[in-house]
Amino acid sequence: MNPVRNYQKELDKIIEKLPQQHTGREAPGLFLHSCCAPCSSYVLEYLRVFFEITVFYYNPNISMQEEYHKRVAEQKRLIQTYNEENGERGHFIHVIEGDYEPSRFFEMAKGLEDCPEGGERCFACYEMRLRETAVRAAAGNYDFFTTTLTISPLKNAGKLNEIGERLAGEYGVSWLPSDFKKRGGYQRSIVLSKQYDLYRQDYCGCVYSRRPQ
């Protein structure tokens, strides 16, 4: 039986070695997939001290266009606020908005519509978003890529790390292991969301997650 991995400790070990790992930037470059502003709030506060972060907002799972635009606007507002208010606390944060392509999500979800929330459909959605992140990270010559999704108590951190590590092998860019809910990360995101008056959605974004389970 394989021991349960502690991804937070694995992240700690990587951070300890960072001065020897950067590739010419002021700090190591991290291409960070973000699902939303609230989840990213703690992750950015935590990691911007160690990395030069580019947030990649790519979430074709968000079915309603109005909802998508509301969430991406909140993401950009938070990053602008962090850069204006907290520059002395870490490196400047960049942001890239990916294509909004819900048709790609629905194509991916064919045959998985009736899967329970947190099951195979969600795993396929993780991979879709992380694969696009890995492609962009490799093309941009970033040192690492990862996702804010592991901060959520409703997301499977083990599966997210498994997918990320596999994609790292495919695309030749290092995966940054994480379980951001550890050490009170999720609770801190709630505090920061209140502090910055962030819109906190009550579902992941896809139509299937809104159905009674």
Image (cartoon, rainbow, N blue to C red):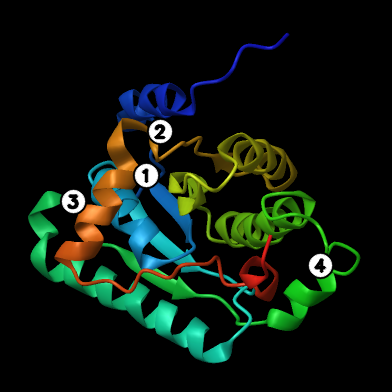
Rendered location of residue 70, percent (x, y): 41, 84
Residue 97, placed above or below residue 13: below
Type of residue at label 4?
Answer: Ala
Q: Which residue is mark 3?
A: 90
Type of residue at label 2?
Answer: Gln
| Local crowd size for mark 1, using a 10 Å CA cut-off: few (<14), some (14–19), many (≥20) | many
Q: Nearer the viewer, mark 3 or mark 1?
A: 3
Q: Which residue is mark 2?
A: 21
Judged from the image, the secondary structure of the residue bearing numbered disc 3 is loop
Rendered location of residue 136, percent (x, y): 59, 62
In the figure, residue 164 lies in which quadrant?
A: top right
Q: Which residue is mark 1?
A: 28
Q: In this rendering, would 69 be left or right of 83? A: right
In the figure, residue 88 lies in which quadrant?
A: bottom left
Q: Nearer the viewer, mark 2 or mark 4?
A: 4
Q: Nearer the viewer, mark 4 or mark 1?
A: 4
Q: Which residue is mark 4?
A: 109
Type of residue at label 3?
Answer: Gly
Residue 174, placed above or below residue 57: above
Would you say the residues marked 3 and 2 are in contact, meaning their CB atoms lie under 8 Å apart? Answer: no
Q: Nearer the viewer, mark 3 or mark 2?
A: 3
What whole-number distance in Å separates the C-alpha atoms at marks 1 and 2?
A: 7 Å
| Mark found first going from the N terminus, 2 or 4 | 2
| Mark found first going from the N terminus, 3 or 4 | 3
| Local crowd size for mark 3, using a 10 Å CA cut-off: few (<14), some (14–19), many (≥20) | some
